[in-house]
Amino acid sequence: MRRVLKAVGYAALPAEVLLVVCLAAGLAVPAPLLYALELLAVTAVLLGVLVYRRARRAGLPPLRALYEVVPEPVVRLVRHELGLLVSLVRWAGRRRHGIRDGVEAFGHARDQAAIMYGFAFVCAVETVGVHLLLRDAPAIARVMLVLDVYSVLFVLGLHAASVTRPHLLEDGRVLRLRQGCHTDLAVPLDAIASVRHAPLFTHEKAEGELNLQVGGQTSVTLELASPVEAVGLLGKRREVRTVRFHADDPKALLAAVRRVRTAPSPAPGTPV
């Protein structure tokens, strides 16, 4: 069943994209071809539902069952794009993700703001320029306008995700280090061997190291006594023992982590 679904999906997705482009460009699509493409798309959806239900009956959790239907990198990319749009809404409403009682938040987006606003401005200027250049080709101009507007929203969404998803110190047990919508690394405090303020502006890739740069810099370095699993944007997993990340106020974050790590444990039988 999965092989059939994969074959139908690989045929249906490019066909649907081509159909949308043709319709946006104002090209006439023969009715029989249009019906055939829609039938192919419906078939792919129905097969996907059957594969998902079979995976759930086999005991897989919902997300793993979804990976049986759609490749994990595709699911993660779609979730990332949706996360950027949701972050724009949170940003407009001045709401941050993961904030609740018992959680301390530490922002990390301040030093990239100027760069991201600059990118957004350049994309906006490009949108106007391309629209003027293509004013004699309205069909192409409409397609490019949609792409250019989305580019502006994408850049703003990247910054909004950083603003609304700060690093979190949860319940004095876990330090969650985040970068946009694609990185959310949970580090148990008892796995931390050392933590220090170490501003760096150059980072080389190395085995067992993770660099969460903001504006090309990191300001805090964690050395771990035991490795933690880091998951990349497309689902690639690897173990890391050194994590470098940035915080707007690294000294406040360090003080909070050290305070929690050195807090005396309650005596046996004492309510926490």
Image: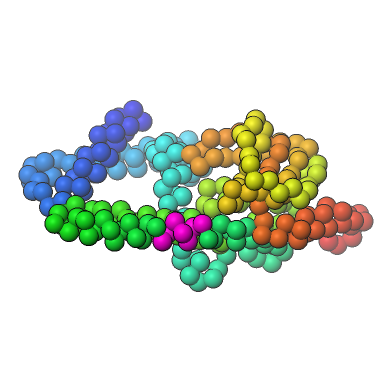
> Viewed as shown, does residue 90 lie left or right of 99?
left
**Range shown magenta:** 115-121
Q: Nearer the viewer, residue 32 or 128?
A: 128
Give the image location of residue 252, x and y in percent. 76, 61
> Viewed as shown, does residue 18 lie left or right of 9?
left
Give the image location of residue 244, x and y in percent. 68, 44
Tell me which residue sits at (81%, 42%) in the image: 193
Tell me which residue sits at (46%, 44%) in the image: 76
Q: Nearer the viewer, residue 42 or 77?
A: 77
| Residue 121 shows up from this direction | yes
Q: Is residue 84 above or below residue 194?
A: below
Give the image location of residue 112, x and y in percent. 56, 57
Res. 73 image quadrant: top left
Q: Is residue 40 above or below residue 117?
A: above
Pick out the residue farthest to the top: 3
Tell me which residue sits at (58%, 52%) in the image: 215
Tell me which residue sits at (83%, 58%) in the image: 259
Most frequent secondary structure within the magenta stretch: helix
- Is residue 86 in the magenta section? no
Q: Is residue 74 above or below residue 7?
A: below
Quick one: quadrant of the N terminus?
top left
Res. 47 image quadrant: top left
Pick out the residue farthest to the bottom: 93
Give the image location of residue 183, x and y in percent. 57, 47
| Residue 239 shows up from this direction | no
Q: Is residue 258 above or below residue 18?
A: below
